[in-house]
Structure formats: C-alpha cells, structure tokens
Image (cartoon, coloured by chain):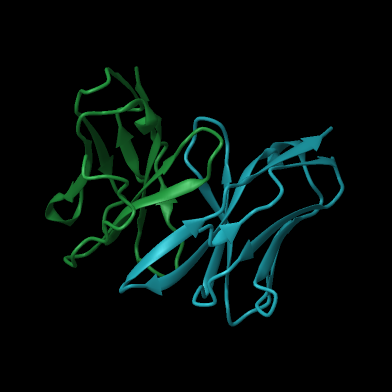
Chain colours: A green, B cyan
C-alpha cells in the first residue's frame, strides 16, 4: 500500500515483558515520528527521525523506551519491561519534508499491558 | 506545559450549521499549523493547514483562521455534515532545538446531529 503501515494493530502483553512495534513509512519520506495517545489524552510526541541526523528522543518517557530507524526507512519502537501505564495507541507518522508539510499517520498499534 | 490547547473537549452541532473548533498556542516560534481529523480505530488524517504568513486558508467546506497576535486558530466547517463527526486535533510545528516537531492539542470531539 501507499500509506504508513504499522504492525501489529493490536498487542496484549504481560507486565514486565518487552514489546516491539513496527512502522513502515511512506516510501521516500525522510521524516518519521512516533506519538502515543493514552485514553482521553492528546497525541504525545515520543521521537523524531529526519534523514541521517541524530534522532530527537526528547519525548521518550523513560529509558525503557527506545527506537531505531534502519536504512532510513522502517522504524521499530521498543518498550522494555512494560508497565500498565504504557497502555496506549502508538502512532507512527511520516513526512516528505519534516517541516512545512503534513505528516501522514498509520492506523496505530493499540498496546494493552495486563 | 501544554503548548497547544483545545479547551473544548466536545462540541455538538446541527447538520447544515457551522462548526467552529478552537485552538490556542503559547509558543510564538510556531509558524505552521495543521488540523487533523480522527475516527475511532484509525490514525489521524490531515485536513487543512496554514502558514503563519497567512491569516486564512480555505479548502471546500473547511476554513482555518489564524490570529497570530492572539495566538489563536480556529477551524470552521460549513455546512456541517454527519460524516464530519470525529475528533479534531490541531497541531503546531516549528524548528525547536534543531528538529521539527508537531505538537498536538488534546482534541475536540465533534458530533454533527442529523
């Protein structure tokens, strides 16, 4: 497909386990963002990748969260030792410009930590 | 520190009438603003944007107004249709600390009544 693809669409995990969330951005988009939306909340910025520049990790809530972007394309968000407060919808977006243009979102991964 | 605020969590409007969604921001460095619409279980979809050099941008039934002195923007939908019922997020963008981020508000749930 031509849009941003995220997998899995739903993930239920036990507290303390590690999870990996995947994002396939739109081909050719140099900017990639991760956001999360907790129940009743807005979209919380997590991390931003732009080309070969060092990522902006300022939104990651703790050192249990990390993200990689391989080959300037696919990105993986990893949450170690998951906690119940990590339960949220994790959204990935990509943009062709990184600025001054719209970001296109995937459908999100709903993470539930039990 | 909520840099982008949507103070109305919900709004109900009769079909055919105008819907006005409001958004306030605090950071004067923001220079590009966007509105997204989100249906349940889907990622946000881009609706309309405006650069800070303009005060109005129109696209069909959707118009965004920007008042820089008041740090306020609004989205007008006219005429409103039942299919417009969704959560609307405003977002602001600027180069902050060397990277470009989209900062989102908490959203306004619009319900258009038939």
Q: State the image coordinates of residue A42 (x, y, percent, origin top left).
A: 52, 45
* Near-viewer residue (B104 or B42): B104
Screen quadrant of the C terminus of chain B:
top right
Q: Is residue A46 left or right of residue A39?
A: left
Which residue is drawn at the image coordinates 49% and 77% (left, top)? Answer: B29
In the drawing, does residue A86 fall left or right of residue B48? left
**As drawn, A104 above or below A6:** below
- Residue shown at 53% from the left, 40% from the top: A41
| Residue closest to the far left | A71
Q: Residue furthest bottom?
A: B53
Q: Does the image show residue A100?
A: no
Position of residue B77 relative to residue B40, above or below, is: below
The image shows residue B83 at horizontal and vertical percentages of 70, 37
Who is closer to the viewer here, A33 or A84? A84
Question: In the rendered image of this protein, does residue B9 appear above or below residue B4?
Answer: above
Give the number of callouts.
Answer: 0
* Residue B63 rendering spot, x and y as whole percentages: 71, 63
Which residue is located at x 32 percent, y 36 percent?
Answer: A6
**Left or right, B104 with reference to B19:** left
Q: Answer yes or no: is residue B33 visible.
A: yes
Answer above or below: position of B41 versus B46. above
Tell me the residue at 20%/23% (across/down).
Answer: A17
Q: Quadrant of residue A82?
A: top left
- Percent position of residue A4, x then y: 35, 44
The image quadrant of residue B62 is bottom right
């Amino acid at each position: 497909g031509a849009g941003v693809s995220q997998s899995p669409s739903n993930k239920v995990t036990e507290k303390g386990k590690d999870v990996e969330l995947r994002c396939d951005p739109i081909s050719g988009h140099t900017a990639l963002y991760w956001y999360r939306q907790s129940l009743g909340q807005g979209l919380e910025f997590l991390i931003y990748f732009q080309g070969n520049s060092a990522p902006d990790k300022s939104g990651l809530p703790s050192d249990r969260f990390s993200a990689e972007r391989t080959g300037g394309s696919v990105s993986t968000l990893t949450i170690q030792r998951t906690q119940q407060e990590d339960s949220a919808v994790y959204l990935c977006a990509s943009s062709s410009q990184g600025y001054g243009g719209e970001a296109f979102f995937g459908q999100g991964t709903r993470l539930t930590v039990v | 520190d909520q840099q982008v605020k949507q103070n109305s969590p919900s709004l109900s409007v009769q079909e055919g009438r105008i819907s006005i969604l409001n958004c306030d921001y605090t950071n004067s460095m923001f220079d590009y603003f966007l509105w997204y619409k989100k249906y349940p279980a889907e990622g946000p979809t881009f609706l309309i944007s405006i650069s800070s050099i303009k005060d109005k941008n129109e696209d069909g039934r959707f118009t965004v107004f920007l008042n820089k002195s008041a740090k306020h923007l609004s989205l007008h939908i006219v005429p409103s249709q039942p299919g417009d019922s969704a959560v609307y997020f405003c977002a602001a963008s600027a180069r902050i600390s060397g990277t470009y981020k989209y900062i989102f508000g908490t959203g306004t749930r619009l319900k258009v009544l038939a």
